[in-house]
């Protein structure tokens, strides 16, 4: 191999290495960006997968009376609940998250209304949210536990009914419509009936 060929080979290898090095840092950055985006889309655990909430539910989640929510609505234009056909306020999940941010700024950080409004305008997604009301989360957990218990009770009752029917031949025959129904069912299926057709006996 000539000196010129060797120099060309080294140059091409350096370019390839530089390209690989330039691509290296971008992958983790893209991964972090995707993870951040996924986390923002998930949002806080509100104890429900619902996308829309009535004002009573929002008051329970945020942990403030409904009239406070209506007051914040007049002070923070980013909160724009829709109105149902019955003219009730319906808050989007994003509105609930914004209300939790407002609560954090006012109650935890001790901002004024004007200061909280400015923080929301400047900080946006970076503003921390207050956790949902512990009373609301407890009620959601209790409702889920009650539903699980109801399912368990129904399963146990169904299992006991099935077991008692299987253990009692009389009850089994009764639930199947009687002995004649069982005989007819067996005949329709083409099954043998040894008690009625014993070999070596003359028919009566």
Image: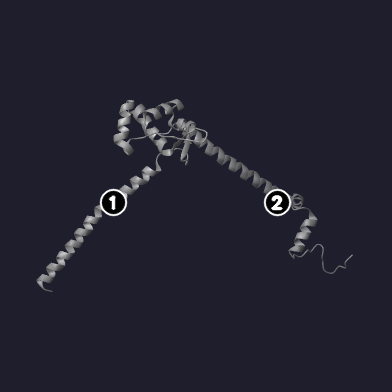
Would you say residue 65 is visible in this rendering?
A: no
Q: Quadrant of residue 63?
A: top left
Q: Would you place residue 55 above or below residue 33 in this image?
A: above
- The location of residue 139, given as percent across then percent down, is 50, 33
Please state the horizontal and vertical placement of residue 84, each as a whole percent of the image.
50, 36
Q: Label 2 near label 1: C-beta < 8 Å? A: no
What number is the disc on residue 28?
1
Q: Residue at x 61, y 45 (%)?
A: 155
In the rendered view, would you say 110 is above or below 128?
above
> Camera-side residue: 116 or 197?
116
Q: Secondary structure at mark 1?
A: helix
Residue located at (28% from left, 49% from top): 29
- Counting from the top left corner in percent of width and height, residue 165 is at 71, 49
Identify the disc placed on residue 126: none
Figure quadrant of the C terminus: bottom right
Residue 166, disc:
2
Q: What residue is at 78 percent from the left and 56 percent from the top?
A: 181
Q: Nearer the viewer, mark 1 or mark 2?
A: 1
Quarter containing the N terminus: bottom left
Label 2 SS: helix
**Within 10 angstroms of label 2, few (less than 14), some, or many (20 or more) residues?**
few
The spot of residue 46 in percent (x, y) is 44, 37
Give the Cα distance between marks 1 and 2. 62 Å
Q: Residues within 10 Å of mark 1 (few under 14, many from 20)?
A: few
Q: Quadrant of residue 130?
A: top left
| Residue drawn where x is 31% and y is 34% of the image | 121
Whichever of labels 1 and 2 marks the residue nearer the N terminus, that label is 1
- Check the image and name the residue furthest to the left: 3
Q: Is residue 22 left or right of residue 183?
A: left
User: What residue occupies the far right of the structure in this picture?
Assistant: 204
Q: Is residue 55 left or right of residue 114?
A: right
């Amino acid at each position: 191999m000539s000196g010129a060929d060797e120099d060309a080979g080294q140059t091409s290898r350096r370019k390839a290495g530089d390209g690989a090095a330039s691509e290296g840092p971008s992958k983790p950055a893209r991964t972090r960006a995707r993870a951040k985006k996924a986390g923002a889309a998930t949002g806080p655990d509100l104890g429900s997968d619902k996308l829309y909430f009535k004002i009573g539910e929002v008051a329970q989640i945020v942990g403030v009376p409904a009239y406070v929510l209506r007051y914040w609505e007049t002070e923070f234009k980013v909160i724009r609940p829709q109105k149902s056909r019955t003219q009730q306020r319906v808050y989007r999940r994003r509105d609930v998250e914004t209300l939790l941010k407002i609560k954090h700024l006012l109650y935890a950080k001790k901002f004024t209304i004007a200061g909280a409004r400015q923080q929301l305008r400047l900080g946006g997604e970076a503003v921390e949210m207050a956790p949902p009301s512990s009373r609301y989360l407890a009620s959601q957990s209790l409702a889920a536990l009650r539903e699980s218990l109801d399912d368990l009770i129904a399963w146990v009752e169904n299992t006991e009914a099935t077991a008692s029917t299987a253990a009692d031949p009389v009850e089994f025959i009764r639930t199947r419509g009687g002995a004649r129904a069982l005989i007819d069912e067996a005949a329709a299926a083409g099954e043998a009936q040894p008690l009625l057709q014993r070999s070596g006996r003359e028919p009566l």
